[in-house]
Image (spheres, helix red, strand yellow):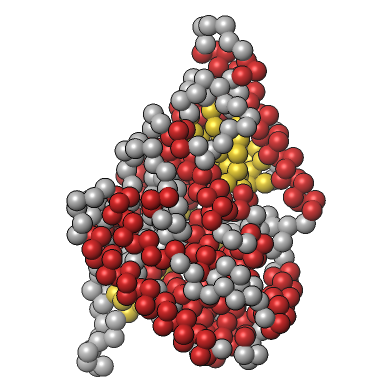
Amino acid sequence: MGFVNELHIFILNWHCLIMMCRYILFLFDYTRNTKQALFILSVVTMSINSARPSILEIKLGNKLKNTLDGFNIFEPLQDQEDRIVALQQLNLLAKQWIQDITLHKSTAKIDMGQSCGKIVTFGSYRLGVNFRGGDMDALLIAPQCLDRVDFFTSFFDTLQSHPTVTDLRAIEEAYVPVMKFKFDKIEIDLLFAQLALQSIPENLAVSDIGLLKDLDFKCVKSLNGCRVAEDILNLVPDHASFRLALMTIKLWAKRKGLYSSIVGFLGGVSWAILMARVCQLYPEAAPVTLVQKFFLIFSNWKWPIPIMLRHPEDIPSADLGLPEWDPRKSLSDSLQRMPILTPTYPIRNTAFNVSVSNMEVLIREFKQGHVVCENVFSGKADWNSLFEPSDFFHRYKHYIIIQAMGGDNQEHLEWSGLVESKIRILIEKLETCLNIKCAHINPIGYSHVDKETHPYCTQWVLGLGIKKPVDPEQTVILDLTESVERFVNIVYQRAASNSKVSRSIQVKTRHVKKYELSKYISSDILEQGRRKRRRS
């Protein structure tokens, strides 16, 4: 196994060396358009190994399935049927709403049977890798007579008055505007896209590039969620292996606190593209091998070389002129650290949020995951060791606790979502502070340990890695005041323009030592990862 891995690392490094040279040529090639220039990087489409699964890999695959069963991530048949029913009901509700609004707006006689929209799914549910009790990503596709204002006002009111809808909130200013809610206890993230069509046929193919014509860019981003999911499924050679391997990586990422794009780690689409890339490199591999190679590849990848699933020349664009990821033309694109590119026009980086600290954490965990997989394959460990909880609460001596406080249940949902969306700003500012080596955010929002005194309080914990002084006797000084105050001011400025939160809400930050965490976080949570840390 060691020789094989060394050979694969050699091949991977050869790939990366060529890619690095081509990437440098790409950055300085201003004579071509984005697609032509990106073609320089398309050498990565070749596979590394096409070997069939061995007996050992099949046995380890059975053990992996048993381990995943133990984490209760697979959805039982009844829950699957409940999701289908909920989607059908939501679809009927949306169609009726579209008919009502169309009838109200239209002055001409129209065929109401032809003016309905439809709801389609994407993300983990569409890819077939959703966890038990997980949320669903969905898109409401509407004809041109409806717009985004209708969606966030009239349809919001329709949902709010529906008896099975709870925890409804609208996030209009998000990168991709979304409404979040529970429909019959099933969490749904619903996007909106208005197409330049008078009616939406039931057999609409979202992959049709012509649908993007004359759309505003927010609708393009919303529609591309579905289009990317379809392309990923079309580009992986074996759906069953891809799904089991991706569910393994998703569980690992959640256990390690790495699954969240909003705070600067990777979201579902990024993890899916990374695993799809591994499937292309090892098209005949068993799921356990795909997991092993996932860690092997991405613990050795030479960022910022981008991850791509297909030749840019194979991505139809219809010359629509939409903005795409291009570090030659965009300063913000050139500063992005982990380009994980969509296989769909317009090409976008799904990991644009990743910070310096979070990238460091990701690579560290990739390397540790590779070590664990090697131990599993050699019989020194079992699959449970891959899913040990993060040692986050025992890794650092200094922490910052970020608290979103106040409001009633509905207002607190809105307020905590706003605060969470700005945590990346705090991370970026802390990274510039003297003596700060790493600002590591835990993406989970925790309740206060004293729920009676603080019933509406969501807390995030940020670990601070401190640079070692040159002189061991020198005292390390941490001055976080300016960074924290800027973050707080930005949050309050954003809140001032949000009519859905009142002046009673608060955001507080507290710099605490490790032993003080128990004042805010329950002991059961703090114990997670303790035994792992003692062994290291």
Q: Quadrant of the N terminus?
A: bottom right
Q: Residue at x 55, y 17 (%)?
A: 102
Does residue 192 lie above or below 146 as drawn? Answer: below
Viewer-proximal residue among 171 and 18 = 18
Q: Quadrant of residue 245?
A: bottom right
At horizontal 27% and vertical 70% (from top left) the residue drawn is 21
- Quick one: 270 or 501, which is closer to the camera? 270
The x, y position of residue 15, in whole percent, is 38, 73
Rendered residue at 25%/87% (across/down): 469
Residue 277 is at least partly visible in this image: yes
- Residue 251 drawn at (x, y percent): 60, 67
Q: Is residue 327 above or below residue 362?
A: above
Residue displayed at 47% across by 81% down: 8
Q: Residue furthest top?
A: 108
The number of callouts visible is 0
Does 128 sit left or right of 210 as displayed?
right
Taking depth in this image into account, of 356 and 459 the one nearest to the observer is: 356
On the image, the x and y values in percent for residue 178 come to 49, 41
In front of the other: 300 or 439: 300
User: Does any portion of residue 366 appear in the rendered image?
Assistant: no
* Vertical side of 63 occupied by 245: above or below: above
Left or right, 53 with respect to 21, comes to right
Please tell me whether residue 274 is drawn above or below residue 172 in the rendered image. Answer: below
Position of residue 312 measured from the top left corner of the image (x, y, whole percent): 38, 53
Residue 507 is drawn in which quadrant? bottom left
